Image (cartoon, rainbow, N blue to C red):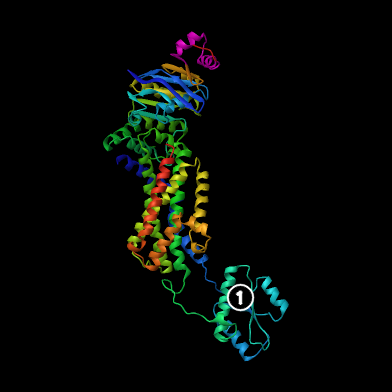
Amino acid sequence: MRILRFILVKEFTQIFRDKAMLPILFVLPVVQLLVLSHAAVFEVNGLRIAVWDQDRTEESRRLEQAFRANTYFEVVEGVQNEAAANRYLREGRVNAVVMIPRGSGVVHVRIDAVDGYTAGIADAYIRQVVASVWPPAIGPDTRIVSGRFRFNPELDDKRNMVPAILVLLITMLGAFLSAMNIVREREIGTMDQLDVTPITRAHFILGKLIPFWLIGLGMFGIGLTVAWAVFGIVSAGPLPVLFGTAALYLLSVLGLGLWVSSVSDTQHQAMLVAWFLLVVFILMSGLFTPVSSMPEWARHIAQLNPVKWYIDLVRRVMLAGAGWADVLPSVGVLAVFAVAWNSLAWWSMRR
Amino acid sequence: MNAIETHHLTKRFGGFTAVDDLTFSVRAGEIFGFLGANGAGKTTAMKMLTGLAAPTSGDATVAGRSIRDHAVSVKKRIGYMSQRFSLYEDLSVRENLRFFGGVYGLDDATLADRIARFETTYHMSGRMHTRVKELPLGIKQNVAFGTALLHQPDIVFLDEPTGGVDPITRRRFWGMLVEEAARGTTLFVTTHYMDEAEYCDRIGMMVDGKLVALDTPARLKQTMGVATMDDVFVKLARGGAA
């Protein structure tokens, strides 16, 4: 224990002496939460549409007014013929052109589908507006089944994104910093010096993991504070569940960092390996696209992704108010990851 | 009494034999110079003696304990200083001393006492809180040596300790080594500088994984019929025998 104490004093001194460290700890969570949660928003706002009214009846004007009054749309002027309609679409000046032909009582809609996601949303919104003004106009599929959204009634993407970004923060911190730190000892040659001392492998690993484990938890706390102070997002579920599971999750992330360091000789290599793994984990985590919409093989692979499990868990706790009993199965999975990666790292450490 | 004894110590990497059936001993309190061209097996032999690598066959006793069976207790009794001055550059002199002293299990009182003694021995007062990276190379070398001695090891291994240092600083450093050996510490030194070999009590010369000569510098020169250690080295490395 005494040896470990000296190792921890040395590690903390070095970590906080590193000029990059304090910005990483305090600026990174704020910037990531602010930028990502605003940028990675899936709600489609400000759809630009042109309304080309050939009918010029009271009915058609009512429809045009409904588009102008709707805050989701921004009506662009100047489309009064076929050529202009096509040009505006092609140049991306409008997302859609709504054309009302003379006397037919129907609406022709052309949508820019370069971005399929936005196109789908635009289509749905336009149908809703048309259906509210001209109930029978577009046919039977304009009937809207009213549903109630639970947990996030306003479908606010920030409430969904913030927990996921918290998870990304501690994942990146844990994996990168621990991997780089250990490889650095090898790179500057102090690893040999440590090897000739009575420090055992267990001392060395604990001495490296404990600081980043505590720092990761601290960062998680800072992130939660920012979420509350800036977005007014407060966890619906109990904080001990969040911190308890974060502690467990960090163990598996640090195990990953440890393993990366054991297969790398330089910090550059460690960075590349860690970056490659994290990109795969993050893309397959359900952060940007739901896991349920992936192809079957990808869904199976995603089950091996701790980032996916933990984002899911944190969302359950923060939004749906899940407690220990609800997250127990996921906790079991996280424990398996923690044990598996740390064992792998232990086994492949070449010292 | 012998500080180091090796018995048929051998290390193979696949088909390559880096250290071939090494049997010799180093007396307690002597400065033992371990010479050889690059790739002669010096580093590998030293790695086995310091517990960094396990022998393929054979064994060695270091500070009275087998390196095969008691690697950890051997590590407590030895010090190590490499040419890379493996101190933490971002820590101060005192922080380095506390760390290395602490991991060798020194208690707080002993540690404080040894650090105070280090400060006077190496004339470091006023520099104890300086970060190691800000020290001149010669001073760093002293600090590394002092750090390796902090837990009062029986044997200190020095792997090319004076690489890249000017002749005056090297001479001063060797003065320190001679003093330390006079106090009874065994010093096992590898070097490429033949003027340094003259300071050693005895010289072991490695060629292709084998120990081809083992004697005092004076007797080596005499037997080989040459005037300088340089000539001894060249003659032995080219395949002559002592």
Residue A50: image quadrant is bottom right
Name the amino acid, label 1: Arg
Which residue is most to the bottom? A58
Question: Position of B67 compared to B222: left or right?
Answer: left
Q: Which residues are drawn in magenta?
A: B212-238
Which residue is drawn at the image coordinates 46% and 39% (left, top)?
Answer: A186
Percent x, y for residue A53?
66, 85
Percent x, y for residue B132?
43, 38
Which residue is drawn at the image coordinates 57% and 84% (left, top)?
Answer: A66
Magenta stretch secondary structure, dominant: helix
Q: Is residue B83 above or below residue A267?
A: above
Question: Position of A324 compared to A134: left or right?
Answer: left
Residue A68: image quadrant is bottom right
- Front-most of residues A16 and A70: A70
Task: Determine which residue is flagged by label 1.
Answer: A48
Percent x, y for residue A60?
62, 87
Q: Residues within 10 Å of mark 1 (few under 14, many from 20)?
A: some
Q: Quarter holding the N terminus of chain A? A: top left
- Front-most of residues A70 and A152: A152
Find out whether residue B172 is within the magenta segment. no
Tell me how many marks there are: 1
Percent x, y for residue A44?
54, 72
Q: Quarter holding the C terminus of chain A? A: top left
Which type of secondary structure does the marked residue at label 1 adopt?
strand
Question: Position of A76 compared to B117: left or right?
Answer: right
Q: Is residue A140 above or below residue A92?
A: below
